[in-house]
Amino acid sequence: MTSIKFVVREGALQGRLPVQDLARACVGECALAAAELGARRAGQTKVPAVLVDDGAVATAFLSERHLSIKGRAPVTFAPLSRFWRTADGWVRTHANYPHHRARLLDALGVPEDTAAVEAALAERSALDVEEAVYAAGGLAVALRSPEEWAAHPQAAEVAKRPLVERGRLDTARARTFAPTGTSPLLPVAGLRVLDLTRVLAGPVATRTLALLGADVLRLDAPQLPELRDQHADTGFGKRSATLDLATDRQTFEDLLQAADVVVTGYRPGALDRFGLSAEALAERRPGVVVAQLSAWGAYGPWRERRGFDSLVQAATGIAVLEGSAEQPGALPAQALDHGTGYLLAAAVLRALTEQSHEGGSRFVRLALARTARWLTDGVDDMGDRVLAAGDAGSGSYDDPGPWLSETDSALGRLRYALSPVSFEGGPTDWDRPPVPWGTDAPGWR
């Protein structure tokens, strides 16, 4: 069994729910998967020891808050992204992106003014707002208690699924890895990852794969610019290009033919018209690993809805558990995003390891709502590999400084959180800082 040790620190990611347990387990699972694949590629019979330090984990789960660019604090949530009182309760909106903000305002029939939004919402029921904003293409979710969410048909669909869905798509031959022989040990050195994700969970996963040696190319639609600070925080180790799939399919097909992994973070089915379902990708690129991420899951009445960590917290009862029905609260970090991101990276690493034994194109699928269920259930089903491992020490978490670093970049001087994924002989930092959004050509290194 792989040696895994924990440094447990008081004061890290404190909440009513076991947030630190979730964070520790997700990072531990990712580090284990990386160490095992790294050992296989290096021809080692002994898997490198893994260390999970609560300080590193807590700092990384707050990476978007610790980022600074030329000394400037990051912008996290926009003024219209928050909880609002309604006539019968609360609703949570997400309006960080300009197009989502415009759709929210259109649905409410008000100008971009906080007082006007507040007044409009106070006159309507939370469920009415939820449906009206969704119909307009915006993002708003009514606050629900855990019991109310349990009675929702989407919750029933989520409960049927494993935390990590995985499967084999075909009978493609076993993957043959070239030996790494590098120092540090990079488990996915030489592999190419197409990153079609946005916001946090997906980019956290691909940021982790970049740390571990992958050539990660993030692709965005040119008409949907990413938020600058968010892109910088999750852009370490990657390149960033824009590509319109509606008008330049050939470029994408050329990239796909040399890709080992495709990671998507859009609503289930949203990219199918471009031939980006797992089955279609495997048909054109046998041996690919397809990793899919969504907010609400790939099944059920909400499967086509957009969503973000804060909205999932509101819908699934987490905001009530961390506060109350009268005054909703929040987790100490966007733990659903970060935790799901590390689990997604771990699932990709395990799929690659399985391919080296058994072959086959593979898919892995995760959802923020399923991670939320795991958290509210008490983080008790990850298994003995992580939660019952040894203890390497204890302490307190008073200052994130030991797990922060600085570097120069095209964006200016950056302060950033280091990765918490740590194993003996593995990388300790990314090989390159983030670049401005869309500045690279859509091609491999």
Image (cartoon, rainbow, N blue to C red):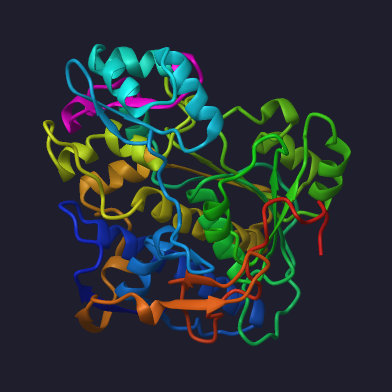
x 33%, y 61%: residue: 23
Q: Residue at x 77, y 47 (%)?
A: 286
Q: Position of residue 208 (x, y in %)?
A: 55, 64
Q: Quadrant of residue 240?
A: bottom right
Q: Position of residue 334 (x, y in %)?
A: 36, 51
* Left-right relation of 191 to 424: right
Please tell me which residue lies in front, 181 or 422.
Answer: 422
* Residue 15 included in the magenta stretch of the image: no
The residues colored magenta run 134-154
Residue 238, picture quadrant? bottom right
User: Which quadrant does the C terminus fall into?
Assistant: bottom right
Q: Is residue 139 magenta?
A: yes
Counting from the top left corner in percent of width and height, residue 258 is at 82, 55
Q: Residue at x 24, y 45 (%)?
A: 330
- Does 264 sit above or below residue 300? below
Would you say residue 344 is visible in this rendering?
yes
